[in-house]
Amino acid sequence: MGPQARRACSFFLLLQVLAEPAENSDFYLGGDYLLGGLFTLHANVKTTGQNQLHVPKCEEYEVKVLGYNLMQAMRFAVEEINNQSGLLPGVRLGYEMVDVCYISNNVQPVLYFLAGDDYFLPILDDYSSYVPRVVAVIGPDNSESTINVANFLSLLLLPQITYSAISDQLRNKERFPAMLRTVPSASHHVEAMVQLMLHFHWNWIIVLISNDDYGRDNSQALSTRLARSDICIAFQEVLPTPEPNQSQTPAERERLASILQKLRQSTAHVVVIFSPELSLHNFFREVQLWKFSDIVWIASESWAIDPVLHKKLRGAGTFLGLTVQAVPIPGFSEFRVRRTKTRPPPPNRTTCNQDCDNCLNTTATYSTILTQSGERVVYSVYTAVYAVAHALHRFLRCNQTGCAKVVVYPWQLLKELWNVSFTLQGQKIFFDQQGDVPMSLEIIQWKWDQSQNPFQSIASYYPMLKHLTVTHSVSWHTPDNTVPVSMCSKSCRPGQRKKPVGMHPCCFECLDCLPGTFLNQTADELDCQPCPSYAWSHRNDTSCFKRRLAFLEWHEVPTIMVALLAALGFLSTLSTLVVFWRHSSTPVVRSAGGPMCFLMLALLLLAFAVVPVYVGPPTVLTCLCRQALFTLCFTVCIACITVRSFQIACIFKMARRLPRAYGYWVRYHGAYVSVLLLTALKLAMVLGNVLATTTNPTHRADPEDPTIMILSCHPNYRKTLLFNASLDLLLSMGGFTFAYMGKELPTNYNEAKFITLSMTFSFTSTVSLCTFMSIYEGVLVTIMDLLVTVLNLLAISLGYFGPKCYLILFFPERNTPSYFNSVIQGYTMRRD
């Protein structure tokens, strides 16, 4: 295989493999150790015949300026290392470079690099003692070519350092053990993009990819990452692959028109493009014809700082790109545009230097923009060369005077490469566990003002921290320089839940959270959570507030009025008790019930005294008093009155018509036994009710005002009241009946009108309270319950005992045995 057979696909003879060092050549610095360089410089390849290569003139093609710039960076690094005595004293590096033409020319160069000096690559069982032509390979730039090359180099563990291939496949060290790179992986590039979208609140994007592994792998990585974010892809399209000569075919034009039509109709205004710049020239030419100016284009690292595209796309929208950080390399800009020394060419051959000089004018026009852009990717190539030099320094055990002269086997150098750690232009360089140099990334904006940096940094992403920091504002191509909106649906207002529309989670309707519910966005944005039972919320609330507790309070007017009535009842009952105690042996007291009167008065005093249990928040004790004590006291009093009414009404008839029955009644204290039995029955009812329904305080929402929480003793308050009042109603009706039967009794014993009034009031008030409670709820029911209870107690205290006190105090002459006997004799004579 001769030199002519080893030519790369483009006309750049400067990249041709040289079999021998050329004196005074800037492109092969002969020495002890040789580096292989793989770059992409040109893609316009034309073939004439089966294996014949057409080499166009310099003016017939468009130079890939970035590729040429990176190639010069490798030359610069090699010369700089060779010219300094500290790193590799006595050792010179050489290089051979090949244009891989994107992906079409990578097998032939890598086989040449693996071959020996005789241009043959032997097939061996063990390559540990095999010495290939080069000690390391720098490049290529794109992931597909890098993977192809790495499949060969990994077999011999020949170190390969790529400067811009970011595919995550290259992190698989079982498959690519000799693969290293001086840029972060695709996952970090994608993470930086996603954080940029989140920063500007873009959740509705379009993805355009090239029809190759680079486009497919990166779009898949982006889709996987977006699955964990609130960002959706409106649609994804594959850009057509252009012809090698960049001429646009009708099929490509039709395909581009279809993509741009979808782009115009979409509501998404952010477009992410994963593609080499080869597929973008025709696309952006159509973009300018369609006059897209409101789009935000997010460029992947493959074309983020391409000066050719930058020169053509003025006014096509806002361009944001992702690239490695800018690290100045002193002296490189001058080195890139220097001309080589001329010398006579060999017969029938054009030298690399001559061809390079012929095209130098073409690339020199981009020198300013390359310099102003910060030579970003250049530093990655520069770092790769220095990493190999430091590995050689370690392996050759170099000192200030020289290095050991030994054979360097690829696997030995690879081992040293993994352990290098040095500082280069102020940056700490080392390879992490995946073989990547954790360089910071930058988000840049394209500027067209030549007085400024054409690729101005606006944000920085730190792979070690996985964090994006925005450092400068963006000049948007929008009215009033406002941030473009790219959302399928506008963000919901606080307190609104999302109702999905269609298949994308970013497309939704906003619905208000109803009262009593709230939206916790950290938990779920699709459903409003109900408030706890003790809390409430208004419409569109994002949190609940505690309901106002409603219970009977002392400062309220109804409470004060009822308390005054209870105080009146307590004082009047106490006065009655004193009067009856002082006149306990008089006929009026005995006719009213005798000792039974003191039981009734004591219970009335107790009931009036514990009226405050209705005021304030209910507790277990107060609920027990309300359910048991009040109703028990009231029932005993009514039972005493009913039994006394029966005794007075029937005594005159029973003594005469049923003397034996009357004897039993008197002998066995029928009145007290009857009261005791009725009290026991009432006590059983109260205990059963307490056991059936809890005495613990409960709360329920006010149906008229849900912001209020009504505190009560138990939820079945109405049923409990009806159950407890059933016996009272029966006793009231019985007392009323017996009192009415005794309307013809002597005046001193005729209490029909007073008992009738008391029992009628008790009956009607209880029925009215039950009716009221079936209609109303809340504190009003509590105050009505207390009011009815106090009035019933007052009816007994004043209605039953009041007339008797009046008789005792103001008509003492009627409170004598002789007067009572005369009245009874007169009643008997009238009956006879």
Image: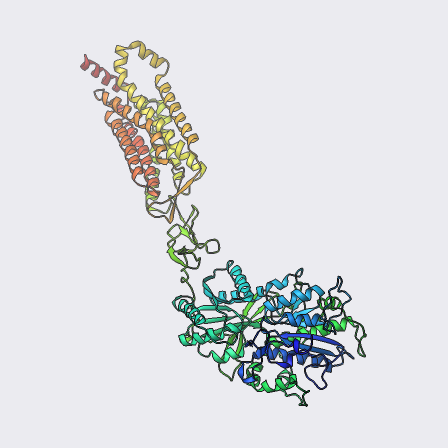
Residue 686, placed above or below residue 273 = above
Identify the residue at image location x=48%, y=53%: 523
Image quadrant where residue 624 sits: top left
Left or right: 754, with 136 as reference point:
left
Which residue is drawn at the image coordinates 38% and 57% (left, top)?
509
| Residue 611 vs residue 355, the one in the foreground | 355
On-image quarter of the N terminus: bottom right
Q: Is residue 539 visible?
A: yes
The single residue placed furthest to the top in the displayed view is 660
Q: Is residue 795 above or below residue 500?
A: above
Left-right relation of 498 to 401: left
Image coordinates of residue 246 in percent, x first then y, are 50, 76
Closer to the camera, 5 or 219?
5
471 and 475: which is toward the camera: 475
Residue 172 placement, left or right of 580:
right
Quadrant for the C terminus in the image: top left
* x and y, in percent, of residue 721 in the image: 35, 33
Within the image, what quadrant is residue 250 found in?
Answer: bottom left
